Amino acid sequence: MAIKIEKKITGYNVVKPEDKVAANPVTVAAPKEVRQAEVIQMHESVERPETLVGSTFKVKSPLFEHALYVTINDIVLNAGTPHELRRPFEIFINSKNMDHFQWIVALTRILSAVFRKGGDVTFIVEELKAVFDPRGGYFKAGGVYMPSIVAEIGAVIEQHMKNIGLIHDPEMDAATRQLIADKRAAYEAAGAKKNTDVSAAASAKGEINDSGFPPGATLCVKCNTQALVLMDGCQTCLNCGYSKCG
Ligand SMILES: [Zn+2]
């Protein structure tokens, strides 16, 4: 039986005599074999196609004078089949600031190599996000704490992996969402009763943080957001629902 191969051959299997014996002659066993062999997973010897699709993220950090431009290009495996898979293939970082050029080049080369190795590459997000700058981090819009520029690169990769469906946000269940809404309402009601003047003055001065969490909210250890407030003597996060009292 002749099979026309329309794609580049990236791997093959030799059909052994026992496979032929096992195959039911009535069902079309041969095409099934071919289909299975065609599903390509990411591995070191997948060649770079001429064209890759990608995204560029602009990163502004108070630690850097100039913006960083992070480009992540993806390879689409098994395009047009039910096994279509979009995976990061390479990463480049560009900036006017040349001071950190060496380690940026080293980092991007290693990250690209990890992407091309295949397997689960999402672990690098947590590795990078856990890097702390000894000079201290900074807050992003939305009150999210960024412990270093490396962590920021990790956050960009995470965002990209979410965009291409490689990482999924854990679904917050309805009960947790309701709990946070209740806590927030209670906190706001208590605050309104106590000191309308203070919060009005605070908002006039622009002290309510970007994400709309109360002024004076501190950093939540669970979600890295400035949304931790004191309620009934207990530190409670109005973003993720974390509570120090369990
Ligand atoms: Zn939180």
Image: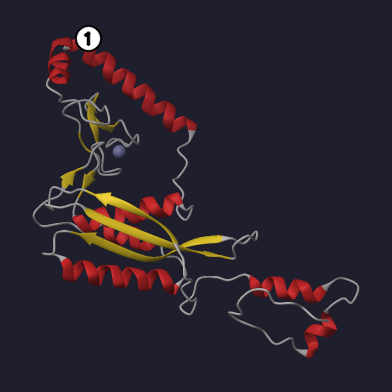
Image vertical order of residue 168 relative to residue 115, above or below: above
Q: Which amino acid, mark 1?
A: Lys
Query: At which x and y percent is residue 166?
Result: 47, 56
**Residue identifier under label 1:** 193
Splitting the image into 4 quarters, where does residue 235 fall? top left
Query: At which x and y percent is residue 147?
Result: 19, 51
Residue at 25% over, 41% down:
144
Ligand 1, seen in the image, is in the quarter at: top left
Question: From the image, which quarter does the N terminus lie in?
Answer: bottom right
Is 125 left or right of 60, judged from the image as shown? right
Query: At which x and y percent is residue 205?
Result: 11, 21
Residue at 14% over, 20% down:
202
Residue at 65% over, 72% down:
38
Direction left: furthest residue: 135
Pick whichever, 215 or 62, lies toward us: 62
Splitting the image into 4 quarters, where does residue 142 fall? top left
Is 82 left or right of 51, judged from the image as shown? right
